[in-house]
Image: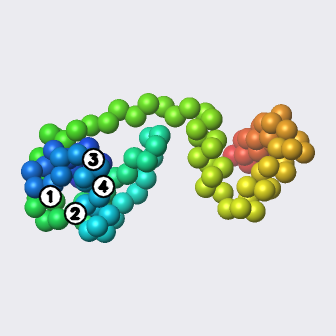
Amino acid sequence: MAKLWYSSKDLSSIEGLPSTMQGINRKARVEGWKSRKRSGVQGKAIEYHIDSLPDFVKSYLIHNQEQLATYSIAPAEPLQIWISAFLRLKGNEQEEVMAWLIRDGIKGLVHFIEEQKRKDKDNE
C-alpha cells in the first residue's frame, strides 16, 4: 500500500519545494494542501495528503518512496494521552468528566473501567 501522508520533513528534501519545514508549512497554507495533525507526536507536527500536493511532488514521491526521511515515534507519555483525549471532548463532555473525577476521584474511574471490562468479558 502506497504511503498517502507526508510530513514537512519528508517534503523538504524535494527539489522545487522550500528546504525548511517552516517553508513547506507556509507553502501548504498558501496553496491549501489537505493536512492533518500527525498522531503520536508532541507539538504541532502536521502531515500532508499526496493528492493535494503539486504534480511534480506526487511524481517524485511515487518514484522515490524508499528515500524519504523516516520518523521514529516515541511512545506517548500517559499524561499527554490523557490531555489529548480530554481536549478532544466537547465542552459539556469535559464538564461531565471533571464532575465524575471530583465526585468519585481517580479510584472511582479505575473501578468503573474495571467493571466495564468485567461486563465485556462476561458478554463474550
> Which quadrant of the structure image shows residue 51?
bottom left
Q: Check disc 1: other Cα within 10 Å, few if <14, some if 14-19, many if 20+.
A: some
Cα gap from disc 2 to disc 4, whole angstroms: 12 Å
Mark 2 or mark 4, earlier in chain: 4
In screen coordinates, is 99 left or right of 14?
right
Q: What residue is pinned by disc 1? A: 57
Give coordinates of residue 57: x percent, y percent. Answer: 14, 58
Give coordinates of residue 5: x percent, y percent. Answer: 30, 54
Disc 4 is placed on an element classified as helix
Frontmost of labels 1 and 3 is 3
Q: What residue is pinned by disc 4? A: 25
Give coordinates of residue 75: x percent, y percent. Answer: 48, 31
Pointers 2 and 1 in contact (CB under 8 A)?
Answer: yes
Disc 3 is placed on an element classified as helix
Q: What residue is pinned by disc 2? A: 53
**Amino acid under label 1?**
Val
Disc 2 is placed on an element classified as loop
Pointers 3 and 4 in contact (CB under 8 A)?
Answer: yes
Q: What residue is pinned by disc 3? A: 21
Cα gap from disc 3 to disc 2, whole angstroms: 15 Å
